[in-house]
């Protein structure tokens, strides 16, 4: 994955064969995810950059990050 990340979960969107939500974490514990761009994700999955949306997640108990 781009941005030195690891995929934690993948949730496909029902009825959409190529639409999914990924939860990512940094590949190194305690390091923030940096350098993750819409363009890098689009290239990794072979989709148009306009199809990519990167958002923060709400901080979760037991997980470092947000």
Image (spheres, rainbow, N blue to C red):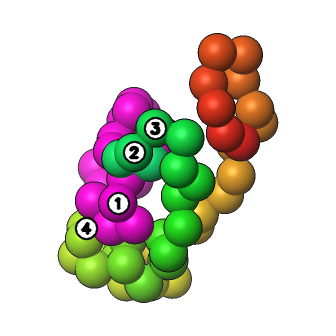
Please say whether residue 10 is visible from this viewpoint. yes
Q: Local crowd at mark 1 within 10 Å, few (<14), some, or many (≥20)?
A: some
Residue at mark 2 to residue at mark 4: CA–CA distance: 22 Å
Q: Secondary structure at mark 1?
A: loop
Q: Secondary structure at mark 2?
A: loop
- The quarter of the picture where the N terminus appears is bottom left
Q: Nearer the viewer, mark 1 or mark 2?
A: 2
Please tell me in which quadrant of the rendered image residue 15 appears.
Answer: top left
Q: Nearer the viewer, residue 17 or 53?
A: 53
Q: Nearer the viewer, mark 1 or mark 3?
A: 3
Q: Return the x and y of residue 30 as percentages of the image width and height.
A: 55, 41
Where does label 1 land, which residue?
4
Which residue occupies the extreme top position in the image? 62
Q: Earlier in the sequence, mark 1 or mark 3?
A: 1
Q: Nearer the viewer, residue 14 or 59?
A: 59
**Tags 1 and 3 touching, CB below 8 Å:** no
Residue 23 horizontal side relative to residue 19, left or right: right
Q: Quadrant of the C terminus?
A: top right
In reply to whether residue 14 is colored magenta, the answer given is yes
Q: Earlier in the sequence, mark 4 or mark 3?
A: 3
Instruction: Tell me the SS state at disc 3.
Output: loop
Residue count near mark 4 (Cα–Cα under 10 Å), binned few <14, some 14–19, many ≥20: few
> Which of the labelled discs sits on residue 28, or is there none?
2
Q: Nearer the viewer, mark 1 or mark 4?
A: 1
Mark 1 in CB contact with mark 2 (< 8 angstroms): yes
Magenta stretch?
Answer: 1-25
Would you say the residues marked 2 and 3 are in contact, meaning their CB atoms lie under 8 Å apart? yes
């Amino acid at each position: 994955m781009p941005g030195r990340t690891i995929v934690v979960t993948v949730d496909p969107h029902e009825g959409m064969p190529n639409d999914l939500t990924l939860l990512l974490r940094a590949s190194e514990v305690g390091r923030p995810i940096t350098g993750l761009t819409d363009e890098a994700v689009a290239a990794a999955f072979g989709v148009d950059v306009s199809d990519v949306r990167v958002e923060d997640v709400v901080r979760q108990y037991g997980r470092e990050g947000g």
